[in-house]
Amino acid sequence: MRALRAFFVRLGSLFVKNSRERDFARELESNLALHTEENLRSGLSLRDARRAALLKFGGISQATESYRERRGLPMLETLLQDFRYGIRTLLKNPGFTAVAILTLALGIGANAAIFTVIKAVLLEPLPYPHPERLVDLYERDVIGTNPFNIVSGANFLDWQHDARSFEQIAVYGEWSSALSPNDGGVPEVVDGAICSHELFSALKVQPAMGRTFTAEEDQHGAGRVAVISDSLWKRRFGARSDVLGTTVRLDGEPHTVIGVMPPGFGFPGRSVHIWLPVWQMVSENDRQSRGNHRFMAIARLRPGVTIDQARSELDGIAARIKAEHPTELTGRGANVVRMDEHMVSGVRPMLLLMLGVVASVLLIACVNVTNLLLERAISRKREVAVRVSLGASRSRILRQFLVESSILSLFGAALGLAVAVFGVRVLIHMAGYIPRIDDVRVDGIVLAFTTAIALLTGIAVGVAPAMSSWRAGLSTAMQEGTRLTPGKSRALFRDALVAVEVALSLMLLIGAGLMLKSFWKLHVIDPGFATDRVVAIRFSLPYKQQPPQIVNTFRDLLDRVRATPGVESAGIVSVAPLAGHFMDTTFTVDGRPPLPKGQFLDAVFRAADPRYFKAMGIPLKRGRVFTEADLLDAADKAIITEGMAQQFFPNEDPIGKRLRLDPKHAFEIVGIVGNTRQNLARDPEPTMYFPLYGGDFNWGTLMIRATGDPNLVSLPVQKIMRAVIPALPPVSVTTTEEMMAGATQSNRFALTLITLFAGLALVLASIGLYGVLAYSVRQRTGEMGIRIALGADAPAITKLVLWQGMKPAAVGIAAGLLGGLASTRLIQSLLFQVKPNDPIVIAAVALVLALIAMAASFAPAWRATRIDPVIALRTE
């Protein structure tokens, strides 16, 4: 026995450093030696007896750690000890560690990716001085009660003259141009903006080189000038320092470059690369008309002026204008809103919804890891009991578990950050148009957010296992092996966690189901025209062409295109279907009494050639379409859609009626055609068509129906267009399949994200349910063995385990149904022809989730039926 005692003394000396600790270790080693002797008497070998004694008391190093804690070692040293011990412990269980880190990485990474987008789009201030004073201005209630109508030129000029709440007021509008620089490069279409000279001073942005245009240059007849972006300067001018004064041709007209804006500037968006004086580019009618609403307006508030004060003043000015011009199509009032808030108002609900979705996914991931740690805590119960019995405080035990869970969470966050970087790129690619999406970056703030989420997650998943472990004393831990079933409180807690997982998964799946049904309805809806084998080529003619020249160009172009091999039919329309509202106008009907003041008839305005309707498969309901004789001065015919006939001629025959757009121009209705949609998610708008051969439009979209693949005729047709129009500016080519996809892009984006995260939540919940049941079966091996030994057959055992799994699943499904009914109203604005409480979708999702829960429960149940009672009882 002396040799045995000497062995433990030498073993203890490896872990203790001073005499007082050595005395404590000797006392502990003496007890270990006594237990070793007892094990030897039971027939074990010396090696097995030593190992059993060490395992029973958790090891000398752990006991000594507890003693050192009682001695009051510095907090930093004990934290480092906890960290080193946690790393060693996790490395001993690589499977558990990998699963936990991967689960947390998915949850944290999804949150980091969505937060990155939200930070850039919703949270960051606009990149201008005092952005809180920048506001958007709108006319209010031009037609109906729309509070955000864009502004007419004449009304804006009155606002600018009379309003005193603003330092600067400016207007702008879209203006794409065909750029032909003198560098020998090929022409390209450049997204640009026309703006008043006050725009740059309102934004308080100075050019990096040169200057912006002046009030004198922002007039008809002034020399044509242009301000370009930093990226265009570098890309098309090679970052030349002598770019100022260079002449470029925009749509065939020479312009002098007078300024280069600083890097990163792009208003109203990053895609804008050139700015032109608005009153120089638009017609005098656009400047003087009160009914032609085509401009966006912004302003900078004077210091000390509130938005409410500015709105009240501008609203009074607009009301006065309305009273002075009652027959004009102008707003009954005005509206002033913060620029940053209004810019993102359309996407805010969707992004906040996505944030809630990924938060739910993270919560499910936390529940899963908590269950894993609870299972692991059971296997460490004896170790913890020894440490508590030797003097370790509960705070030290809690800290050890929290350190280990934080290690898992931090490693998960590191991997999740990589997921976020990749995910952000995918989100930008999928999103389509979202304001400020180009500013999305993974930066220090995102890193800090991810770290904070990781630490909170580590605490959340570590508390429950720590509390579960410290409650039992040493004697309870030593007798743990004699228990046939887990404690009721622990089992209830695990079941509650599973129910939470199932409930959250069901809520997400209901949202995904509603979005899927909505997208399906949107995808199969009839757009009003044939979408197969059609390619659309949007183009414009060079300026300075007279109406007869325009008509001859269109007719010659169509004749040549229709004779091209592979072309079945072709037509031209001013604005293609699904291209958006774009333009509308008011009208009156000859013979009707005047409407009350302030009321107007308004419809979408389009121009089309005679064979356009046949080429696009738009059915003729009554009357006729245009003919070749409807041109120039004889182009006084009109075709209306069914929707327009029903809305404006409900109890009369519109054929033969005359529509009057202004006192000089009236058009006889000669036909009624089917409705076409400009937006798939909205009802068809009342539309009126006028002859393209009237010569009023020098742009349009060539719609070509091919006999086969429409992409194969695109290049031959473009060659013909270049032959007919040698100075043709660059064109834009899309197929109708691409147009349909673009019309549903925002819906597809929301559907893809919520479906992806709902699927991830479902997988995590299924794994969590399976893991809990599998562990429960292992823990109840002895009980199952006794049941089988006493005559329980396989169906009875299967039913027992299935019931154990389906109870929390059923509770979760019930809670998820209640939560889903309440939460689906949040996505109501994203749904198309689908109610948020659709019973078919909700019932189908609940059934699918119940079946998946049953499938996840079946594998542990089958394993329980395979238990050998002899082996099971021997383990006890």
Image (cartoon, rainbow, N blue to C red):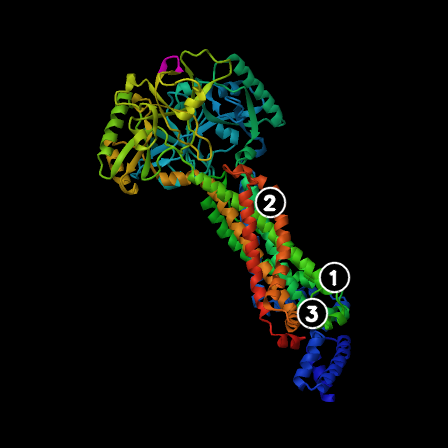
- Could you tell me the amino acid type at mark 1? Ser
Q: Amino acid at mark 2?
A: Gly
User: Can you say whether 684 is above or below 523 in the image?
Assistant: above
Q: Which residues are magenta?
A: 661-666
Residue at position x 57%, y 45% from top? 355
Residue at image mark 2: 820
> What residue appears at the point 74 percent right and 61 percent down from the top-left corner?
395
- Tell me, for residue 709, which label it has, or none: none
Q: In the rendered structure, find residue 484 and report the number of the disc placed on it.
A: 3
User: In the rendered view, would you say 793 is above or below 613?
Assistant: below
Instruction: Identify the residue at horizontal 29%, vertical 43% (top origin).
Output: 709
Residue flagged by tag 3: what amino acid is it?
Leu
Regarding residue 33, the answer to whether it shows in the image is: yes
First in sequence: mark 2 or mark 3? 3
Q: Quadrant of the C terminus?
A: bottom right
Q: CA distance from mark 3 to mark 1?
A: 30 Å
Res. 395 mark: 1
